[in-house]
Image (cartoon, rainbow, N blue to C red):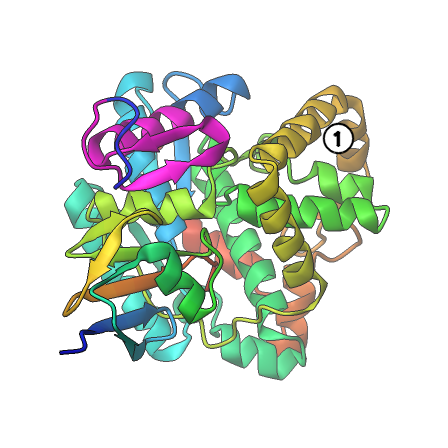
Amino acid sequence: MAKCSKCGSKAVIKVPYARMNLCERHFIEYFEGRVAATIERYGLLKEGDSVLVAVSGGKDSVALLSALAVVASELRLKVMPLHMHLGLGVYSDESLRVVKEVSRKLGMNTFILSLKGVVGAAIPELSAKSSRPPCAVCGLVKRYVLNAAAIEWGVDAVATGHHIDDLAPYALKNLLLGDMEAALKLAPVTAGEEGYLARRVRPLYEVTERECLTYAIVKGLPFVKTSCPNVFLGGMDALIRKFLYELDLRHPGVKLRFMRSLAKIAAKSLASQARVQTELTRCRYCGLPSRSEVCGFCRLTERALGSPAGPKVREALRSIRVSSR
Amino acid sequence: MVSLLIVRVRIYPIRKEVIIEKPARRVMRVMTLLRELGYGVYEAVVVKGGKPLTEDDVIMDGDEVEVYEVRSTG
């Protein structure tokens, strides 16, 4: 039986890169401390900030919400959870049930948006009518609605539950494919621009997926225990993920060092971030960021529904009374 | 009498239930269970009675455990 490196009681997790075994109590402290340290190390949030937190109901987002709730009291953050009902049948219904339960448990008021209500169609319909894969549609729609909500509600940042095991494989893949610009977007923070582009932060940047799962379990947080019906876990991404797993198993901490290096390069490349942003223009329909005349979301919805839904989404979000201060 | 270890395992998120039977054994290490199920040592978290177990912990005959795969599913 492994014993806690701090108190000698029964350990619930081994953390190889930190050379520690931790019991329930000390692991909770460790995890929340690591989230707080990540926020400080990379300057993700400052005292008094309002932060919109994307909560899907999965283990990672509920772990993020719970840890932020702890950090919030110290930093006087205003934490605003947001859940989107994606219209994926029983999976989405179960996600919504879990989010409501976790919100109740944490004493938080979560904004619930139904895509069907706000956009006019859910993911399956948008995917079928646009002939685009559901995962691509889902990612695009979630990014758009999150950014639009942050802009309309005037929040200081959007936080997502991406942890090191989400980010490191993509960072490595982008480097292997020679796309440095895409790799740098996986930094712990990406710059925003007032009234246009929300600042995005990743407080779980330095924690692993296994730690998120263990934290959710030991904290007794409800989380969705089924897979999205559209989940795909193959291809190059899966191979790179497996490679990083094996590498980190033999050389604990190498994944963390890799992502810290990436964060350093990203921080030094503020000039290039500014360059990337100047390449963005405003969508002629909705006014939000776009690489061409029409943003991806308006293009998608125009194709699927006959008219671009961006302006309608912004209007619907504006009509929700939200206080970000 | 030959001893037999029987452990009931519920796996998430695939929601599969399996029964592991090991003759001539009274206990099994978590690490061994994970290997039996085809997982690497940090590719799943084993939970007994609501508490996560480390790879060195042992599972006994008659135990019921939950195994959570460490992967994003949404």
The stretch in magenta equals A7-35
Q: Which residue is the site of mark 1? A: A273
Q: Quadrant of the rendered structure where residue A93 is?
A: bottom left
At 40% from the left and 49% from the top, the residue drawn is: A60
Relative depth, front residue between A145 and A38: A38
> Where residue A302 appears, x then y in whole percent?
66, 71
Q: Quadrant of the N terminus of chain A?
A: top left
> Where residue A212 appears, x then y in whole percent?
38, 45
Relative depth, front residue between A29 and A231: A29
Q: With respect to residue A77, does A120 lie above or below?
A: below
The answer to if A134 sits in the magenta stretch is no
Relative depth, front residue between B63 and A32: B63
> Where residue B48 appears, x then y in whole percent?
20, 57
At 56% from the left and 57% from the top, the residue drawn is: A311
Q: Quadrant of the rendered structure where residue A172 is?
A: top right
At 77% from the left and 48% from the top, the residue drawn is: A174
The answer to if A29 sits in the magenta stretch is yes
